Amino acid sequence: MAISVKRIDGGSVSNWLIEHFQVGDTLIADKPNGSFHMANADHEPMLLLSAGSGVTPMMSMLRDLSDRDAVNNVVFFHQCSTVDDIPFAEELKSLEVKHENLTVMLSLTQSSDDWQGLKGRFSLSHLKQIPDLTARQVFVCGPDGFMQKAKNLMLKKGLAEDHYHQEAFGVATATEYSVKALQISIDGNVFEGDNQKTLLEQAEDAGMSIAHTCRAGFCGACKVTVESGLVHQPDVPAIQESEIAEGKVLACCSVPRTDVEIVS
């Protein structure tokens, strides 16, 4: 098993892992979960499209296909800033040499003058260079804005919606609000909070516990019900629109906007 860690300024977990985690240390991990996987699509043409650290699940899929000698008409497209930011560069070169049906496309948003590859953020001009788009199963991972733009472009080009699959690797940034003091009630326990931190963070600051696992909107373990008040719930994989309509939110990534009463 391998994990990819991107250092985040101020991040507790990423910085600790990079500075302290060593070969031979043990991580306790939950079982694989979610719907972002190839299923039975590995016999179809594919586009693996990523930006930034969204490359992680794409490399996992590509390695699996390579191990099974099932790289059949795969386009691997990754967007990053500079040559130095290209992840797994040598491995991708080796895989492209090994598999004649693999095409690796790299686009740099801050390229040097001597860069001979693609340039700029993913756009229609890049999309036009991907052959047989509408016949492909498309897997996308990256920042929210990148994925939204990619989806809009591809659906407009005729890609069937059931051929499009995406995975968020973080929580979308909420709209900025001025700091406001709020009253938060969780299971009848009332404390002072604000409209900046998530419900989970504020409960922990108040010495309370809410069941959770991933802290990123992927697993759904922290699902709670809003009895009263307004809460901003970003678009993440572990909660459906129908559940939000019923008043449910994920404590790990939802932020109160008014005084709220929550039942866990």
Image: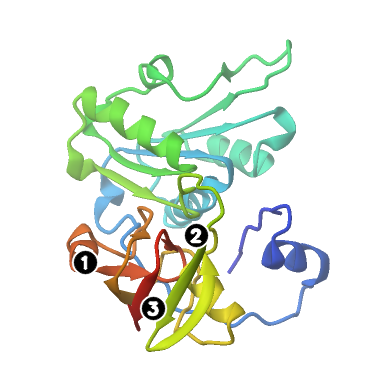
Which residue is at the far top?
113
Secondary structure beneath label 2: loop
Looking at the rendered image, the quarter that the N terminus falls into is bottom right
Q: What label sits on residue 163 in the rendered view?
A: none
Looking at the rendered image, the quarter that the C terminus falls into is bottom left
2 or 3: tag closer to the N-terminus: 2
Q: Residue at x 44, y 84 (%)?
A: 211
Label 3 is placed on what type of residue? Ala
Label 1 is placed on what type of residue? Glu
Residue 57 placement (x, y as % from top left): 48, 53
1 or 3: tag closer to the N-terminus: 3
Asked whether residue 220 appears in the rendered view, the answer is no
User: Marks 1 and 2, how far apart in space?
Assistant: 22 Å
Q: Residue at x 48, y 78 (%)?
A: 213
For disc 2, the marked residue is 195
Residue 197 placement (x, y as % from top left): 54, 63
**For the residues bearing labels 2 and 3, Cβ distance under 8 angstroms:** no
Mark count: 3
For disc 3, the marked residue is 221
> In the visual, does 145 lie left or right of 247?
right
1 or 2: tag closer to the N-terminus: 2
Secondary structure beneath label 1: helix
User: Marks 2 and 3, how far apart in space?
Assistant: 22 Å
Residue 172 placement (x, y as % from top left): 46, 49
Asked whether residue 136 appears in the rendered view, the answer is yes
User: Marks 1 and 3, how far apart in space?
Assistant: 14 Å
For disc 1, the marked residue is 243
In the displayed structure, would residue 182 be above or below residue 61? below
